[in-house]
Image: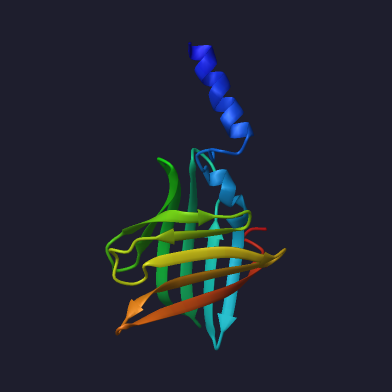
Amino acid sequence: MMNELLAMTVLTLAMGQVSPRPTVDRVVWLQGCWAMDSNGRLVEEQWLAPRASSMLGVGRTTRGTTLVDYEMVLIRERGEQLAYEAHPANQEPAVFMSTAIGERSIVFENLKHDFPQRIGYERTGGERLDAWVEGPQNGQTRRTTFSYARVPCAGD
């Protein structure tokens, strides 16, 4: 009986009728160091390689020698989705769950959060990464996009 169940599961997966549980390996394309310089404001993100069903990311925003903002993020497997656990500076942590995972894109959502309610990443080219946050603000939907270029990681 167990062999029949296993065989049916493998056959169903092979036929594409059931999507396999997403793993952090699906977002390995985030790995590395990314930066955006805009009007003297430097926004950086660094993502470690997937390990132990998780990816760690850290971001910071600086203006000259002043630290403006920072955030630590954990992406990990949770059930049938990936969880994006954001730990921003001076704010309570928030968890966003994956709603769409593509070959080089992912969207996370938490409609109970104030702003943002959606967070997305997309590799738009070999050395380009777009990240965005979106949600309601003052009665309208606001979206902020960060267009990053790959940069060497410190120590490279």
Say whether residue 123 is left or right of residue 64: right
Specify the farthest residue to the top: 1
Say whether residue 104 is left or right of residue 70: right
Residue 52 position, x and y percent, is: 49, 38
Residue 94 position, x and y percent, is: 32, 59
Question: What's the residue at 67%, 58% (across, down)?
Answer: 156
Specify the farthest residue to the right: 126
Q: Nearer the viewer, residue 97 or 75?
A: 97
Question: What's the residue at 53%, 38% (across, down)?
Answer: 18
Counting every numbered tag in the picture gives 0
Colouring scheme, one of rainbow, by chain, secondary structure, one colour: rainbow
Residue 30 position, x and y percent, is: 59, 57
User: Hey, which quadrant is residue 13 in on the image?
Assistant: top right
Q: Nearer the viewer, residue 20 or 47?
A: 20
Residue 148 seen anywhere in this rendered image of the structure:
yes
User: Hey, which quadrant is residue 110 in on the image?
Assistant: bottom left
Q: Nearer the viewer, residue 54 or 9?
A: 9
From what the image shows, is residue 128 above or below residue 14? below
Residue 66 seen anywhere in this rendered image of the structure:
no
